[in-house]
Image: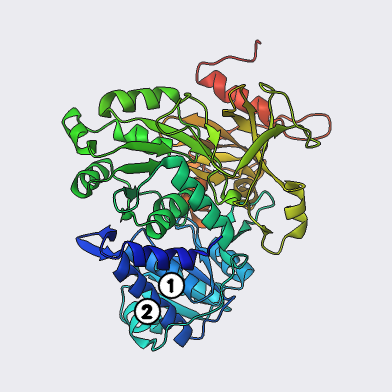
Amino acid sequence: MATLVELLRESARNYGVHPAILFQGRTITHSEFGELTDRVAAGLAAKGIVAGDRVALYCVNSDVFAAAYFGILKAGATVVPINLLLNPKEIAYILNDADAKTLIYHELFAEQARFLSQLAPGTARRICIGLSNPLHDISWDNLLSEGKEVPQPAIAEDDLAAILYTSGTTGHPKGAMLMHRNLAANVASIREALHLEPGKDVLLCVLPMFHAFAATVCMIFPLTNGCTLVPVPKFDPQGVADAIAAHGVTVFAAVPSMFNVLLRLPAAEATKLASLHFAVSGGAAMPVEVMRQFEKKFGKLIYEGDGPTECSPVTCVNPIGGKRKPASVGLPIPRVEMKIVDEEGNELPHGTVGEIVVRGPNVMKGYWKQPEETARSFFGKWFRTGDLGTEDDEGYFYIVDRKKDMLIVNGMNVYPRVIEEVLFQHPAIREVAVVGEPDKLHGEIPVAYVSLKEGCEVTASELRQFCLDNLGRHQVPRKFKFIPQLPRNAAGKVLKRELRMEGEYERGVDRRAL
Protein backbone atom coordinates (compact mmCIF):
# COMPACT_ATOMS: atom_id res chain seq x y z
CA MET A 1 0.00 0.00 0.00
CA ALA A 2 1.43 3.39 -1.03
CA THR A 3 1.65 6.40 1.26
CA LEU A 4 -0.47 9.49 0.66
CA VAL A 5 2.67 11.34 -0.48
CA GLU A 6 3.40 8.67 -3.09
CA LEU A 7 -0.21 8.76 -4.28
CA LEU A 8 -0.07 12.55 -4.64
CA ARG A 9 3.17 12.44 -6.64
CA GLU A 10 1.72 9.72 -8.89
CA SER A 11 -1.40 11.84 -9.51
CA ALA A 12 0.81 14.81 -10.46
CA ARG A 13 2.74 12.64 -12.93
CA ASN A 14 -0.29 11.02 -14.54
CA TYR A 15 -2.75 13.93 -14.55
CA GLY A 16 -0.43 16.94 -14.41
CA VAL A 17 -2.39 19.22 -16.77
CA HIS A 18 -5.80 18.33 -15.31
CA PRO A 19 -7.29 20.73 -12.73
CA ALA A 20 -6.67 19.61 -9.17
CA ILE A 21 -8.39 22.54 -7.41
CA LEU A 22 -10.82 25.21 -8.59
CA PHE A 23 -11.16 27.96 -5.99
CA GLN A 24 -12.40 31.54 -6.23
CA GLY A 25 -11.32 32.00 -9.83
CA ARG A 26 -8.00 30.18 -9.42
CA THR A 27 -7.18 26.94 -11.21
CA ILE A 28 -4.37 24.77 -9.85
CA THR A 29 -3.40 21.77 -11.96
CA HIS A 30 -2.21 18.51 -10.40
CA SER A 31 1.34 19.32 -11.50
CA GLU A 32 1.14 22.80 -9.97
CA PHE A 33 -0.35 21.39 -6.77
CA GLY A 34 2.54 18.97 -6.52
CA GLU A 35 5.00 21.87 -6.83
CA LEU A 36 3.05 24.00 -4.32
CA THR A 37 3.04 21.27 -1.69
CA ASP A 38 6.77 20.76 -2.25
CA ARG A 39 7.28 24.45 -1.43
CA VAL A 40 5.17 24.12 1.72
CA ALA A 41 7.21 21.09 2.81
CA ALA A 42 10.46 22.94 2.10
CA GLY A 43 9.27 25.96 4.07
CA LEU A 44 8.27 23.81 7.04
CA ALA A 45 11.62 22.06 6.98
CA ALA A 46 13.37 25.44 6.90
CA LYS A 47 11.36 26.42 9.99
CA GLY A 48 12.55 23.35 11.86
CA ILE A 49 9.79 20.81 11.23
CA VAL A 50 11.18 17.28 11.06
CA ALA A 51 9.66 13.88 10.44
CA GLY A 52 7.33 12.82 13.23
CA ASP A 53 6.41 16.33 14.38
CA ARG A 54 2.74 17.22 14.75
CA VAL A 55 1.49 20.31 12.90
CA ALA A 56 -1.98 21.68 13.66
CA LEU A 57 -4.07 23.09 10.80
CA TYR A 58 -6.74 25.68 11.67
CA CYS A 59 -8.16 26.86 8.36
CA VAL A 60 -11.34 27.32 6.34
CA ASN A 61 -12.11 25.28 3.22
CA SER A 62 -9.72 26.53 0.55
CA ASP A 63 -6.87 25.66 -1.76
CA VAL A 64 -4.40 26.58 0.99
CA PHE A 65 -5.99 24.11 3.41
CA ALA A 66 -5.23 21.32 0.95
CA ALA A 67 -1.74 22.69 0.23
CA ALA A 68 -0.92 22.90 3.94
CA TYR A 69 -2.32 19.42 4.60
CA PHE A 70 -0.20 17.70 1.96
CA GLY A 71 2.80 19.96 2.59
CA ILE A 72 2.80 18.78 6.19
CA LEU A 73 2.72 15.16 5.02
CA LYS A 74 5.55 15.73 2.53
CA ALA A 75 7.66 17.10 5.38
CA GLY A 76 7.16 13.75 7.12
CA ALA A 77 5.02 15.34 9.81
CA THR A 78 1.53 14.56 11.10
CA VAL A 79 -1.51 16.73 10.42
CA VAL A 80 -3.74 17.70 13.36
CA PRO A 81 -6.85 19.35 11.87
CA ILE A 82 -8.69 21.76 14.18
CA ASN A 83 -12.47 21.92 14.38
CA LEU A 84 -13.37 25.54 13.54
CA LEU A 85 -16.30 25.52 15.97
CA LEU A 86 -14.20 24.88 19.06
CA ASN A 87 -13.38 27.65 21.50
CA PRO A 88 -9.72 28.51 22.32
CA LYS A 89 -9.70 26.43 25.53
CA GLU A 90 -10.73 23.30 23.63
CA ILE A 91 -8.25 23.99 20.85
CA ALA A 92 -5.48 24.53 23.40
CA TYR A 93 -6.23 21.12 24.92
CA ILE A 94 -5.75 19.51 21.50
CA LEU A 95 -2.53 21.40 20.78
CA ASN A 96 -1.10 20.48 24.16
CA ASP A 97 -2.25 16.87 24.01
CA ALA A 98 -0.84 16.36 20.52
CA ASP A 99 2.41 18.13 21.44
CA ALA A 100 1.96 20.22 18.29
CA LYS A 101 5.14 22.05 17.36
CA THR A 102 3.48 24.38 14.86
CA LEU A 103 0.06 25.90 14.22
CA ILE A 104 -0.90 26.93 10.69
CA TYR A 105 -3.94 29.20 10.96
CA HIS A 106 -6.07 31.33 8.65
CA GLU A 107 -6.14 35.07 9.16
CA LEU A 108 -9.82 34.81 10.14
CA PHE A 109 -8.65 33.17 13.37
CA ALA A 110 -5.91 35.65 14.28
CA GLU A 111 -7.70 36.63 17.50
CA GLN A 112 -8.08 33.00 18.57
CA ALA A 113 -4.39 32.47 17.76
CA ARG A 114 -3.55 35.30 20.13
CA PHE A 115 -5.23 33.42 22.99
CA LEU A 116 -3.65 30.13 21.92
CA SER A 117 -0.17 31.61 22.23
CA GLN A 118 -0.87 31.84 25.98
CA LEU A 119 -2.92 28.66 26.42
CA ALA A 120 -0.61 26.40 24.41
CA PRO A 121 2.90 27.81 24.83
CA GLY A 122 4.43 24.61 23.51
CA THR A 123 3.09 25.47 20.07
CA ALA A 124 5.44 28.40 19.81
CA ARG A 125 5.79 28.41 16.03
CA ARG A 126 2.75 29.89 14.26
CA ILE A 127 2.18 30.41 10.54
CA CYS A 128 -0.62 32.67 9.34
CA ILE A 129 -2.36 32.28 6.00
CA GLY A 130 -3.32 35.69 4.62
CA LEU A 131 -1.59 38.32 6.75
CA SER A 132 1.91 39.66 6.28
CA ASN A 133 3.04 39.86 9.91
CA PRO A 134 0.24 39.13 12.40
CA LEU A 135 1.32 38.81 16.00
CA HIS A 136 4.89 38.64 14.63
CA ASP A 137 4.05 35.21 13.24
CA ILE A 138 5.39 33.68 10.04
CA SER A 139 3.37 34.64 6.96
CA TRP A 140 2.26 32.10 4.37
CA ASP A 141 4.20 33.92 1.64
CA ASN A 142 7.31 33.80 3.79
CA LEU A 143 6.85 30.08 4.33
CA LEU A 144 6.57 29.44 0.57
CA SER A 145 9.62 31.52 -0.30
CA GLU A 146 12.03 30.53 2.45
CA GLY A 147 12.50 26.84 1.81
CA LYS A 148 15.42 26.11 -0.52
CA GLU A 149 15.35 22.32 -0.56
CA VAL A 150 12.38 19.95 -0.63
CA PRO A 151 12.76 17.44 2.23
CA GLN A 152 12.84 13.77 1.32
CA PRO A 153 12.01 11.99 4.58
CA ALA A 154 11.61 8.23 4.50
CA ILE A 155 7.84 7.96 4.91
CA ALA A 156 6.42 4.48 5.50
CA GLU A 157 2.83 3.32 5.20
CA ASP A 158 2.72 2.70 8.95
CA ASP A 159 3.76 6.28 9.75
CA LEU A 160 1.22 8.54 11.39
CA ALA A 161 -0.47 10.77 8.80
CA ALA A 162 -3.18 12.49 10.86
CA ILE A 163 -4.60 12.71 14.36
CA LEU A 164 -8.30 13.47 14.18
CA TYR A 165 -9.79 14.51 17.50
CA THR A 166 -13.29 13.31 18.27
CA SER A 167 -15.45 14.36 21.19
CA GLY A 168 -14.64 12.38 24.31
CA THR A 169 -17.07 10.82 26.74
CA THR A 170 -14.84 11.84 29.64
CA GLY A 171 -14.99 15.54 28.83
CA HIS A 172 -11.83 15.61 26.68
CA PRO A 173 -11.55 14.72 22.98
CA LYS A 174 -9.70 11.61 21.83
CA GLY A 175 -7.18 11.69 19.00
CA ALA A 176 -7.78 8.93 16.45
CA MET A 177 -4.42 7.96 14.96
CA LEU A 178 -4.75 7.38 11.21
CA MET A 179 -1.71 5.98 9.45
CA HIS A 180 -0.84 6.55 5.80
CA ARG A 181 -2.01 3.01 5.02
CA ASN A 182 -5.38 3.61 6.74
CA LEU A 183 -6.20 6.66 4.63
CA ALA A 184 -4.66 5.24 1.44
CA ALA A 185 -6.69 2.05 1.83
CA ASN A 186 -9.89 4.01 2.39
CA VAL A 187 -9.22 6.15 -0.69
CA ALA A 188 -8.69 3.01 -2.80
CA SER A 189 -11.92 1.48 -1.51
CA ILE A 190 -13.83 4.71 -2.16
CA ARG A 191 -12.56 4.77 -5.75
CA GLU A 192 -13.95 1.29 -6.33
CA ALA A 193 -17.21 1.85 -4.47
CA LEU A 194 -18.11 5.17 -6.08
CA HIS A 195 -16.81 4.31 -9.59
CA LEU A 196 -15.16 7.72 -9.99
CA GLU A 197 -12.95 8.44 -12.99
CA PRO A 198 -9.60 10.25 -12.90
CA GLY A 199 -9.47 13.26 -15.17
CA LYS A 200 -13.26 13.49 -15.30
CA ASP A 201 -14.98 13.67 -11.92
CA VAL A 202 -15.30 16.96 -10.01
CA LEU A 203 -16.12 16.88 -6.28
CA LEU A 204 -17.52 19.85 -4.37
CA CYS A 205 -16.42 20.16 -0.74
CA VAL A 206 -18.64 22.34 1.42
CA LEU A 207 -18.36 20.03 4.41
CA PRO A 208 -15.63 21.39 6.71
CA MET A 209 -12.31 19.97 5.57
CA PHE A 210 -11.21 19.32 9.16
CA HIS A 211 -13.98 16.70 9.27
CA ALA A 212 -13.02 13.10 8.41
CA PHE A 213 -15.81 12.69 5.81
CA ALA A 214 -14.79 15.84 3.93
CA ALA A 215 -11.05 15.27 4.27
CA THR A 216 -11.01 11.74 2.85
CA VAL A 217 -13.86 11.73 0.34
CA CYS A 218 -13.79 15.33 -0.92
CA MET A 219 -10.11 16.32 -0.56
CA ILE A 220 -7.66 13.42 -0.29
CA PHE A 221 -9.46 11.27 -2.85
CA PRO A 222 -9.63 13.74 -5.76
CA LEU A 223 -6.12 15.10 -5.19
CA THR A 224 -4.55 11.64 -5.19
CA ASN A 225 -6.66 10.24 -8.02
CA GLY A 226 -6.53 12.82 -10.78
CA CYS A 227 -9.96 14.28 -10.05
CA THR A 228 -10.88 17.88 -9.23
CA LEU A 229 -11.67 19.47 -5.84
CA VAL A 230 -13.94 22.52 -5.57
CA PRO A 231 -13.67 23.86 -1.98
CA VAL A 232 -16.53 26.04 -0.71
CA PRO A 233 -15.77 27.87 2.57
CA LYS A 234 -19.34 28.28 3.80
CA PHE A 235 -22.58 26.43 3.22
CA ASP A 236 -25.14 28.55 1.44
CA PRO A 237 -27.71 26.79 -0.77
CA GLN A 238 -27.55 29.37 -3.56
CA GLY A 239 -23.76 29.45 -3.42
CA VAL A 240 -23.57 25.66 -3.61
CA ALA A 241 -25.94 25.56 -6.59
CA ASP A 242 -23.94 28.27 -8.34
CA ALA A 243 -20.64 26.44 -7.70
CA ILE A 244 -22.03 23.15 -9.03
CA ALA A 245 -23.18 24.86 -12.21
CA ALA A 246 -20.04 26.97 -12.68
CA HIS A 247 -17.56 24.09 -12.29
CA GLY A 248 -19.53 21.16 -13.68
CA VAL A 249 -19.46 19.33 -10.36
CA THR A 250 -20.26 15.63 -10.76
CA VAL A 251 -20.35 14.47 -7.12
CA PHE A 252 -21.83 16.34 -4.16
CA ALA A 253 -21.13 14.94 -0.68
CA ALA A 254 -23.03 16.40 2.27
CA VAL A 255 -24.80 15.73 5.55
CA PRO A 256 -28.62 15.35 5.55
CA SER A 257 -29.31 18.85 6.89
CA MET A 258 -27.62 20.33 3.81
CA PHE A 259 -29.87 18.38 1.46
CA ASN A 260 -32.84 19.60 3.47
CA VAL A 261 -31.78 23.24 3.12
CA LEU A 262 -31.19 22.84 -0.62
CA LEU A 263 -34.88 22.00 -0.94
CA ARG A 264 -35.56 25.68 -0.23
CA LEU A 265 -34.05 26.69 -3.56
CA PRO A 266 -36.58 27.99 -6.11
CA ALA A 267 -37.66 25.39 -8.66
CA ALA A 268 -35.94 27.38 -11.40
CA GLU A 269 -32.57 26.73 -9.70
CA ALA A 270 -32.93 22.96 -10.03
CA THR A 271 -31.20 23.02 -13.43
CA LYS A 272 -27.99 24.24 -11.77
CA LEU A 273 -27.50 20.73 -10.37
CA ALA A 274 -27.74 19.20 -13.84
CA SER A 275 -24.05 18.22 -13.99
CA LEU A 276 -24.28 15.98 -10.91
CA HIS A 277 -23.99 12.27 -11.51
CA PHE A 278 -25.16 11.58 -7.96
CA ALA A 279 -24.92 12.80 -4.37
CA VAL A 280 -23.54 11.07 -1.28
CA SER A 281 -24.94 11.50 2.22
CA GLY A 282 -23.18 10.65 5.48
CA GLY A 283 -22.45 11.91 8.98
CA ALA A 284 -26.01 11.40 10.24
CA ALA A 285 -29.12 9.42 9.41
CA MET A 286 -30.74 10.59 6.18
CA PRO A 287 -34.52 11.10 6.65
CA VAL A 288 -36.29 9.11 3.97
CA GLU A 289 -38.69 11.98 3.26
CA VAL A 290 -35.83 14.43 2.68
CA MET A 291 -34.21 11.97 0.28
CA ARG A 292 -37.48 11.50 -1.58
CA GLN A 293 -38.14 15.24 -1.90
CA PHE A 294 -34.58 16.01 -3.02
CA GLU A 295 -34.62 13.34 -5.71
CA LYS A 296 -38.04 14.44 -6.94
CA LYS A 297 -37.06 18.13 -7.14
CA PHE A 298 -33.55 17.81 -8.60
CA GLY A 299 -33.72 14.45 -10.36
CA LYS A 300 -30.48 13.31 -8.73
CA LEU A 301 -30.07 10.18 -6.61
CA ILE A 302 -28.63 10.26 -3.10
CA TYR A 303 -26.54 7.29 -2.00
CA GLU A 304 -26.36 7.06 1.78
CA GLY A 305 -23.25 5.74 3.51
CA ASP A 306 -21.59 5.81 6.90
CA GLY A 307 -18.39 5.46 8.84
CA PRO A 308 -16.77 6.78 12.03
CA THR A 309 -13.66 8.95 12.15
CA GLU A 310 -11.70 5.99 13.51
CA CYS A 311 -12.28 4.13 10.22
CA SER A 312 -10.76 6.84 8.01
CA PRO A 313 -13.88 7.15 7.88
CA VAL A 314 -15.93 5.38 5.18
CA THR A 315 -17.10 1.85 5.94
CA CYS A 316 -20.21 1.40 3.81
CA VAL A 317 -22.42 2.96 1.14
CA ASN A 318 -25.39 2.00 -0.98
CA PRO A 319 -23.98 0.61 -4.26
CA ILE A 320 -23.72 3.27 -6.97
CA GLY A 321 -25.99 2.25 -9.83
CA GLY A 322 -27.17 -0.77 -7.84
CA LYS A 323 -29.94 -1.46 -5.36
CA ARG A 324 -30.48 1.40 -2.94
CA LYS A 325 -32.38 0.84 0.26
CA PRO A 326 -33.82 3.94 1.96
CA ALA A 327 -32.86 4.17 5.66
CA SER A 328 -29.94 1.82 5.02
CA VAL A 329 -26.28 2.89 5.07
CA GLY A 330 -25.64 0.25 2.44
CA LEU A 331 -23.03 -2.45 1.95
CA PRO A 332 -19.45 -2.56 3.25
CA ILE A 333 -17.03 -1.00 0.76
CA PRO A 334 -14.27 -3.18 -0.76
CA ARG A 335 -11.79 -4.68 1.75
CA VAL A 336 -13.90 -3.56 4.72
CA GLU A 337 -15.81 -6.05 6.86
CA MET A 338 -18.77 -5.26 9.11
CA LYS A 339 -20.92 -7.33 11.43
CA ILE A 340 -23.40 -7.02 14.28
CA VAL A 341 -22.29 -8.31 17.68
CA ASP A 342 -23.54 -8.59 21.24
CA GLU A 343 -21.86 -7.18 24.34
CA GLU A 344 -19.27 -9.98 24.32
CA GLY A 345 -18.39 -9.55 20.66
CA ASN A 346 -20.33 -12.58 19.44
CA GLU A 347 -21.89 -12.21 15.98
CA LEU A 348 -25.67 -11.93 15.97
CA PRO A 349 -28.17 -13.30 13.39
CA HIS A 350 -29.44 -11.06 10.62
CA GLY A 351 -32.22 -8.76 11.70
CA THR A 352 -31.02 -8.67 15.33
CA VAL A 353 -30.08 -5.34 16.87
CA GLY A 354 -26.54 -5.15 18.19
CA GLU A 355 -23.38 -3.09 17.96
CA ILE A 356 -21.82 -2.52 14.54
CA VAL A 357 -18.14 -3.48 14.46
CA VAL A 358 -15.66 -2.96 11.61
CA ARG A 359 -12.44 -4.65 10.50
CA GLY A 360 -10.12 -3.65 7.66
CA PRO A 361 -6.98 -1.76 6.62
CA ASN A 362 -8.86 1.52 7.10
CA VAL A 363 -9.25 1.08 10.87
CA MET A 364 -7.13 3.37 13.03
CA LYS A 365 -4.08 2.27 14.99
CA GLY A 366 -5.66 3.57 18.21
CA TYR A 367 -6.23 6.70 20.26
CA TRP A 368 -3.27 9.04 20.81
CA LYS A 369 -1.76 8.46 24.26
CA GLN A 370 -4.87 6.54 25.44
CA PRO A 371 -4.04 2.80 25.40
CA GLU A 372 -6.85 1.89 27.82
CA GLU A 373 -9.45 3.72 25.74
CA THR A 374 -8.03 2.03 22.65
CA ALA A 375 -8.36 -1.41 24.24
CA ARG A 376 -11.99 -0.73 25.18
CA SER A 377 -12.76 0.21 21.58
CA PHE A 378 -11.84 -3.14 20.04
CA PHE A 379 -12.98 -6.75 20.07
CA GLY A 380 -9.68 -8.17 18.86
CA LYS A 381 -9.16 -6.49 15.47
CA TRP A 382 -12.81 -5.42 15.21
CA PHE A 383 -13.41 -1.74 15.99
CA ARG A 384 -16.51 -1.05 18.08
CA THR A 385 -18.35 1.83 16.41
CA GLY A 386 -20.76 2.45 19.28
CA ASP A 387 -23.64 2.34 16.79
CA LEU A 388 -26.53 0.00 17.32
CA GLY A 389 -27.78 -1.50 14.09
CA THR A 390 -28.95 -4.49 12.10
CA GLU A 391 -27.89 -6.36 8.97
CA ASP A 392 -30.46 -7.75 6.55
CA ASP A 393 -30.24 -10.96 4.53
CA GLU A 394 -28.68 -9.13 1.57
CA GLY A 395 -25.86 -7.69 3.69
CA TYR A 396 -27.22 -4.14 3.94
CA PHE A 397 -26.66 -2.39 7.25
CA TYR A 398 -29.06 -0.13 9.16
CA ILE A 399 -28.17 2.16 12.07
CA VAL A 400 -30.87 2.00 14.71
CA ASP A 401 -29.50 4.20 17.47
CA ARG A 402 -26.37 5.33 19.25
CA LYS A 403 -25.17 2.98 21.93
CA LYS A 404 -24.22 5.90 24.10
CA ASP A 405 -25.92 9.23 24.44
CA MET A 406 -23.96 10.85 21.65
CA LEU A 407 -25.80 13.35 19.48
CA ILE A 408 -25.18 14.11 15.81
CA VAL A 409 -25.56 17.85 15.17
CA ASN A 410 -25.01 18.85 11.53
CA GLY A 411 -22.98 15.70 11.02
CA MET A 412 -20.66 16.33 13.98
CA ASN A 413 -20.43 14.32 17.18
CA VAL A 414 -21.69 16.03 20.32
CA TYR A 415 -21.50 14.34 23.72
CA PRO A 416 -24.03 15.50 26.34
CA ARG A 417 -21.60 15.01 29.19
CA VAL A 418 -19.23 17.63 27.77
CA ILE A 419 -22.09 20.15 27.80
CA GLU A 420 -23.21 19.06 31.26
CA GLU A 421 -19.72 19.51 32.72
CA VAL A 422 -19.67 23.10 31.46
CA LEU A 423 -23.15 23.89 32.75
CA PHE A 424 -22.32 22.42 36.14
CA GLN A 425 -19.75 25.20 36.48
CA HIS A 426 -22.49 27.83 36.44
CA PRO A 427 -23.11 29.01 40.02
CA ALA A 428 -26.91 28.91 39.70
CA ILE A 429 -27.19 25.32 38.49
CA ARG A 430 -27.78 22.47 40.88
CA GLU A 431 -28.06 19.67 38.39
CA VAL A 432 -28.38 19.32 34.63
CA ALA A 433 -28.94 16.63 32.02
CA VAL A 434 -28.63 17.02 28.27
CA VAL A 435 -30.52 14.86 25.78
CA GLY A 436 -31.05 15.00 22.04
CA GLU A 437 -34.15 16.05 20.17
CA PRO A 438 -34.72 15.20 16.48
CA ASP A 439 -34.52 18.22 14.21
CA LYS A 440 -35.26 18.38 10.48
CA LEU A 441 -32.56 20.94 9.79
CA HIS A 442 -29.71 19.88 12.10
CA GLY A 443 -30.36 16.15 12.50
CA GLU A 444 -30.48 16.53 16.27
CA ILE A 445 -30.25 19.42 18.70
CA PRO A 446 -29.08 19.37 22.33
CA VAL A 447 -31.75 20.10 24.94
CA ALA A 448 -30.66 20.91 28.49
CA TYR A 449 -32.89 20.09 31.46
CA VAL A 450 -31.81 22.32 34.32
CA SER A 451 -32.58 22.37 38.02
CA LEU A 452 -31.49 25.53 39.83
CA LYS A 453 -30.15 25.98 43.32
CA GLU A 454 -32.63 27.35 45.82
CA GLY A 455 -32.90 31.12 45.64
CA CYS A 456 -31.01 31.34 42.33
CA GLU A 457 -32.33 32.70 39.08
CA VAL A 458 -30.93 32.58 35.56
CA THR A 459 -32.46 32.91 32.12
CA ALA A 460 -32.10 30.64 29.11
CA SER A 461 -30.33 33.48 27.28
CA GLU A 462 -27.76 33.78 30.04
CA LEU A 463 -27.11 30.05 30.01
CA ARG A 464 -26.80 30.07 26.25
CA GLN A 465 -24.16 32.79 26.43
CA PHE A 466 -22.34 30.89 29.17
CA CYS A 467 -22.19 27.88 26.87
CA LEU A 468 -21.03 29.98 23.93
CA ASP A 469 -18.11 31.17 26.07
CA ASN A 470 -17.05 27.63 26.88
CA LEU A 471 -18.23 25.35 24.07
CA GLY A 472 -18.26 25.11 20.30
CA ARG A 473 -21.37 26.52 18.66
CA HIS A 474 -22.57 23.08 17.60
CA GLN A 475 -22.50 21.96 21.26
CA VAL A 476 -24.62 24.80 22.65
CA PRO A 477 -28.14 23.61 23.67
CA ARG A 478 -30.86 25.02 21.48
CA LYS A 479 -33.37 24.70 24.32
CA PHE A 480 -33.19 25.05 28.09
CA LYS A 481 -35.98 23.56 30.17
CA PHE A 482 -36.21 24.39 33.87
CA ILE A 483 -37.55 21.67 36.15
CA PRO A 484 -37.58 21.30 39.98
CA GLN A 485 -35.45 18.15 39.93
CA LEU A 486 -34.17 15.54 37.53
CA PRO A 487 -35.76 12.09 37.50
CA ARG A 488 -33.47 9.46 38.97
CA ASN A 489 -33.58 5.75 39.65
CA ALA A 490 -32.95 4.08 42.99
CA ALA A 491 -29.21 4.15 42.40
CA GLY A 492 -29.30 7.92 41.82
CA LYS A 493 -28.72 7.72 38.07
CA VAL A 494 -30.52 10.33 35.97
CA LEU A 495 -33.24 8.72 33.85
CA LYS A 496 -32.61 10.43 30.53
CA ARG A 497 -35.16 8.17 28.90
CA GLU A 498 -37.90 9.91 30.87
CA LEU A 499 -36.61 13.31 29.78
CA ARG A 500 -36.72 12.22 26.15
CA MET A 501 -40.25 10.92 26.61
CA GLU A 502 -41.25 14.22 28.21
CA GLY A 503 -39.89 16.02 25.18
CA GLU A 504 -41.79 13.71 22.83
CA TYR A 505 -44.99 14.36 24.76
CA GLU A 506 -44.53 18.10 24.35
CA ARG A 507 -44.08 17.57 20.61
CA GLY A 508 -47.30 15.57 20.44
CA VAL A 509 -45.91 12.03 20.77
CA ASP A 510 -47.20 10.55 24.03
CA ARG A 511 -45.32 7.37 24.84
CA ARG A 512 -45.88 7.68 28.55
CA ALA A 513 -49.12 5.76 28.28
CA LEU A 514 -47.49 2.89 26.35
Q: Residue at left 51%, top 47%?
A: 189
Residue 5: x percent and y percent? 47, 68
Q: Check disc 1 and report the residue beneath it.
A: 71
Counting labels gives: 2
Using the image, determine if residue 182 lies above or below residue 283: below
Q: Provide the secondary structure element on which disc 2 rests.
A: helix
Q: Check disc 2 and report the residue beneath it.
A: 39
> Farthest residue in the top direction?
513
Q: In what quadrant of the picture does the N terminus appear?
A: bottom right
Residue 432: x percent and y percent? 65, 40
For marks 1 and 2 on the same chain, the one whose residue lies earlier in the sequence: 2
Q: Indicate the quadrant where residue 263 lies.
A: top left
Q: Residue at left 19%, top 48%?
A: 246
Quick one: 48 or 501, which is closer to the camera?
48
- Residues at discs 1 and 2 in contact (Cβ within 8 Å): yes
Q: Provide the secondary structure element on which disc 1 rests.
A: helix
Badge 2 density bin: few <14, some 14–19, many ≥20, Cα 10 Å: many
Q: Indicate the quadrant where residue 339 lies.
A: top right
